[in-house]
Image (cartoon, rainbow, N blue to C red):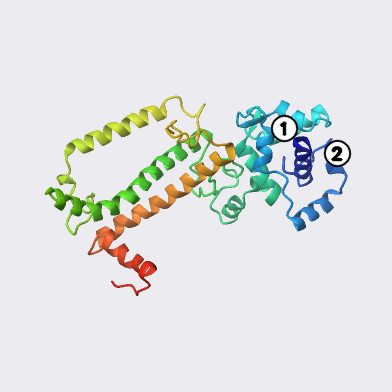
Amino acid sequence: MIRTAAIAALAGAATVEAFAPGAALPGVRSARAVRPAMALKMQQQTKITYLTPELFKQLDKDGNGTIDLNELKDAVGYTADSDVKSLFARADLDGSGDIDYPEYQRLMNMERFGDAQGGSNDVRFALDSGLLKPDSILVDNIMVGNKGFDPAGFAKDTQTLNQYREAELKHGRLAMLAALGWPVAEYAQPLIAKSIGAPDLLAAGEKAPSLLNGGLDRINPLFFMVTLGFTAAVEVFGLKGGFADREPGDLGFDPLNLYYGSDEATKADYRLKELNNGRLAMIAITGYVIEDFFGATNVVTTTGKVAAPFVTGQPIEL
């Protein structure tokens, strides 16, 4: 069953030149049975997709998260050895000697959307819109969440790109915590302070303490010392060893084994969700700061009035 699925997948990929832009795949006999133009037309009409996450798990027999040359040979055993090596080299984008799941995702996208720019419609849009330079490393890149947005050309090479991605993930994680903590502090701190007879630590207008709102002088200096010490330790640990054996942002923290205990497709989904939620949170916390600074009331009061109609069905009261 695995061999049949793999043969169909690789034949389909060969038909649409998914393993290399403009390159045919010699020796894959299933692809020769139908004229390429006719096969592509049929595939477009019927929306056939051969490459799937389930097939990756079937090909990855040893469960190490990659497909090596021997596993690929076993899947397409009748194909000439030289042709399998050629096919493998085209799929192995980074030349690491195996096909990891991001490279496999690239093949799935190329099968669905064509070979150019690794099958990424986002990158094509960025190129057409002038938001990405044609010689950028992001033009055909397997990094999760790549939208091709780099109008200033900051991503000069892989090392620089990894450093920017790690910084983006760290800021996104902090922003997700802040996006929750900011309104919770404005809502809950006065209630807690009143119930235990402690001073109200919010700034004027019951706003969260910040550089713009003021009120930081009310916070115990020990809090800032502990925070700085913790973040410094995380930075030192994160910078140790570079990116040779880890993904950007991966600090090995997974006490519940939610990430490391999942398959490669689920891991890729988790990485994308964390990145997208982090990006959204950075926009949200920026909105909080602006709203608190220019508004007469705090975020909870203003946003609560805006959100209330979705719950009560009543008009907005500002």
Residue at image position (27%, 34%) is 228
Q: Where is residue 227 in the image (x, y as percent from the top left)?
A: 27, 36
Q: What residue type is labelled 2?
A: Arg
Q: Which of marks 1 and 2 is nearer the N terminus?
A: 2
Give the class, few, some or many, for how many residues have Cα within 10 Å of label 2's Cα (few <14, many ≥20).
few
Q: Is residue 262 visible?
A: yes
- Outermost residue to the front: 195
Q: Where is residue 176 in the image (x, y as percent from the top left)?
A: 38, 47
The residue indicated by pointer 2 is 29
What number is the disc on residue 226? none
Image quadrant where residue 286 sits: bottom left
What number is the disc on residue 88? 1
Tell me the quadrant of the picture where the N terminus can be found: top right
Q: Do the residues labelled 1 and 2 touch (CB within 8 Å)?
A: no
Q: Position of residue 172 (x, y in %)?
A: 40, 45
Q: Can residue 137 be seen in this view?
A: no
Residue at image position (75%, 34%) is 87
Determine the secondary structure under disc 1.
helix
Residue 80 lies, with reference to residue 19, above or below; the image says above
Q: Which amino acid does label 1 sit on?
A: Phe
Determine the secondary structure under disc 2.
helix
Residue 167 lies, with reference to residue 290, above or below; the image says above
Q: Name the one closer to the observer, 65 or 149.
A: 65
Give the class, few, some or many, for how many residues have Cα within 10 Å of label 1's Cα (few <14, many ≥20).
many
